[in-house]
Structures are given as C-alpha cells and as structure tokens.
Image: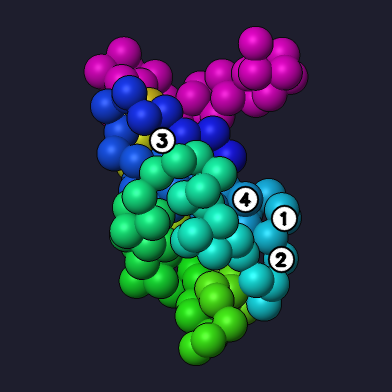
C-alpha cells in the first residue's frame, strides 16, 4: 500500500481503495484476516480513526466484516462484489462516453465493434 498524505484524495478513501484492490488482486483472500487499523496506522504514521473510516467504507459495501475480538476479515463473495462494482464504474466512465462520442461521429455499432477489435489486436496501444 502507498498513501499520499499531500494529495487531493482523502486518506481514508485511499485506504479503502487500496484494501479493495488488494482483495481484488488476491493479496488478501476471502475469509482471510486483513491488517488491523493499528498496524496500518503505524505503517503509514496516520491516525487509526482515519484507517477505521476507510475500513468502514468496505464494511458498508459488504467487502469486509469484523469478527468481534479478532479483527477485520474479507467477506466471502467480496471479489465478485468488487468485480461487479468495477464493471459498473467501467460502463459509466468509459463505455457510455465512448458510445456517445461514436454517435456524434456517426460511427455505427458494427464499426465501433470493429474499432474495438482493432484496439485489442494492437494490444491496446
């Protein structure tokens, strides 16, 4: 994890995003314990309440849960939940604007699919 204390993104959001990404990429497996608020706060020299606020975002999203007296754990099904969330964000951030611009340029659906395939063939470059 890497926290930018001087950036525009609030630290608690950075904590939540990086924990989520660690879960999604398999650093933390479902039903596995994640580092405690104290461990994370000591590692980055930040307030434990800030870390807890980020973790609580993931609790509210059903990605992690607290085992009383034991700490925070990755919820079963968390990876699929994150994938679904990110696919929705991908649709809103990339696909919908792409289709809107394609319509402005009078690019048909078939031609757009062809352009996307060409992009895949070029390795996204």
Q: Mark 2 Cα within 10 Å, few/some/many (few <14, many 20+)?
A: some
Secondary structure beneath disc 2? loop
- Residue 4: where, in percent of width, then height? 42, 28
Mark 4 sits on what residue? 22
* Magenta-drawn segment: 99-125
The reply to whether the C-beta atoms of the residues labelled 3 and 4 are less than 8 Å apart is no
Q: Residue at x 54, y 73 (%)?
A: 72
- Residue 3: where, in percent of width, then height? 46, 34
Mark 1 sits on what residue? 26
Which mark is in front, 3 or 1? Answer: 1
Side (left or right) of 108 relative to 23: left
Q: Residue at x 54, y 64 (%)?
A: 36
The reply to whether the C-beta atoms of the residues labelled 2 and 1 are less than 8 Å apart is yes
Mark 2 sits on what residue? 29
Label 3 and label 2: CA atoms lie apart by 30 Å
Q: Residue at x 65, y 18 (%)?
A: 124
Q: Is residue 93 above or below residue 26?
A: above
Label 3 and label 4: CA atoms lie apart by 25 Å
Ranked by sequence position, the earlier of labels 3 and 1 is: 1
Q: Residue at x 36, y 30 (%)?
A: 5
């Amino acid at each position: 994890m890497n926290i930018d204390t001087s950036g525009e993104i609030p630290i608690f959001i950075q904590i939540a995003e990086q924990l989520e990404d660690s879960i999604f990429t398999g650093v933390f497996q479902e039903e596995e314990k994640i580092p405690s608020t104290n461990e994370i706060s000591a590692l980055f020299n930040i307030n434990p309440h800030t870390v807890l606020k980020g973790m609580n975002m993931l609790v509210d999203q059903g990605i992690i849960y607290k085992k009383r007296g034991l700490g925070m754990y990755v919820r079963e099904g968390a990876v699929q939940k994150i994938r679904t969330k990110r696919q929705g964000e991908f649709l809103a951030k990339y696909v919908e604007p792409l289709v809107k611009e394609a319509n402005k340029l009078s690019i048909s659906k078939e031609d757009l699919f062809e352009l996307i395939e060409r992009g895949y063939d070029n390795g996204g470059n």
